[in-house]
Image (cartoon, helix red, strand yellow):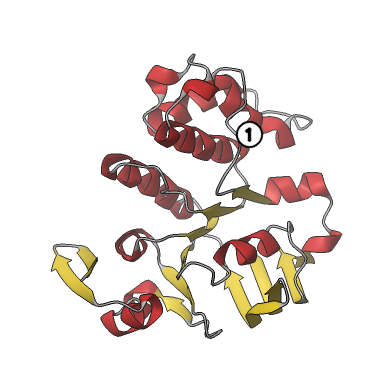
Amino acid sequence: MLKASGLSIEVAGRSLIEGLALEVERGQCWALLGRNGTGKTSLLFALAGLRRPHRGVIQIEGRPLADTPRRELALRLGILLQDEPADFWGSTLDYVLLGRFPRSRTAFAPDTDPREQAQRLLVELELAEHLTQPYRTLSGGERQRARIAQLLMQDPDCLLLDEPLQHLDLRHQLTVMQALAARARAGRALLMVLHEPTAAARFCDHALLLYHAGRIPQGPTNELLTQENLESLYQCRIEPVSAPGIQAFIPR
């Protein structure tokens, strides 16, 4: 689905990523973990075509990203940025409907009503009571869920998300991760920056670890997310705690 070969990224003359090979397939949910400043956002921007890599090739469905027309790319690939200005003056529903813009010149199925679809997303992300509320008046966590709803409204084949859990309380972290995991089960490809290894272990099937030294191990989360690897990654003590069906990691 989304493939990077020999990918190298530099920022301000400093090499962050060197020679990365990555392939995110349909139905997979990847977590991108690492300390601040290791290049997680820069990598996400490169994979989305928003930053030119120093070296390497990025392909979407076998076609170079640079050769893919913007409208087609918007159908294939969507990104949740870490920060956006909250200056949209319409309602929360109108904001979510903006996600349908890439498909505005394509035919809808006869039984598809974009407003109904947007309303279903607002219910799924527990924002139904804010449907008519001006977007700019939402709290930080409510705006974050509205932004995710807009991305889901776009319905791309591959979703890139930069810290989707920021600003969210525990309940809504769970709501969002369940919604994203459902998209992977439906055949979408997902890659998200997370600072919560427990969420990565519970909801993601693959992980990529970015170290300051340039090491980039990757693999299934149940193999990669170990106490040893996480302590090396975050440079702090990590206590693994097991519960039925859940592996948690507690910093000490």
Q: In the image, what residue occupies the spot 36% across and 47% down? A: 178
Mark 1: few/some/many CA within 10 Å (<14, 14-19, 20+)? many
Choose top left, top right, bottom left or bottom right for residue 86.
top right
Q: In the image, what residue occupies the spot 51% across and 35% down? A: 149
The front one of 196 and 57 is: 196
Residue 251 percent coordinates (x, y)? 24, 69
Q: In the image, what residue occupies the spot 47% across and 54% down? A: 184
Q: Which residue is mark 1?
A: 99
Residue 222 percent coordinates (x, y)? 32, 75
Choose top left, top right, bottom left or bottom right for residue 71.
top right
Residue 89 seen in the figure: yes
- Secondary structure at badge 1 equals helix
The front one of 41 and 145 is: 41
Which image quarter holds the N terminus? bottom right
Residue 72 percent coordinates (x, y)? 78, 48
For residue 129, side relative to residue 28 (left or right): left
Which image quarter holds the C terminus? bottom left
Reply above or below: 79 against 46. Answer: above
Residue 116 seen in the figure: no
Residue 35 percent coordinates (x, y)? 45, 70
Reply above or below: 207 against 223. Answer: above
The kind of residue on which mark 1 rests is Gly
How many badges with numbers are in the image?
1
The front one of 4 and 44 is: 44
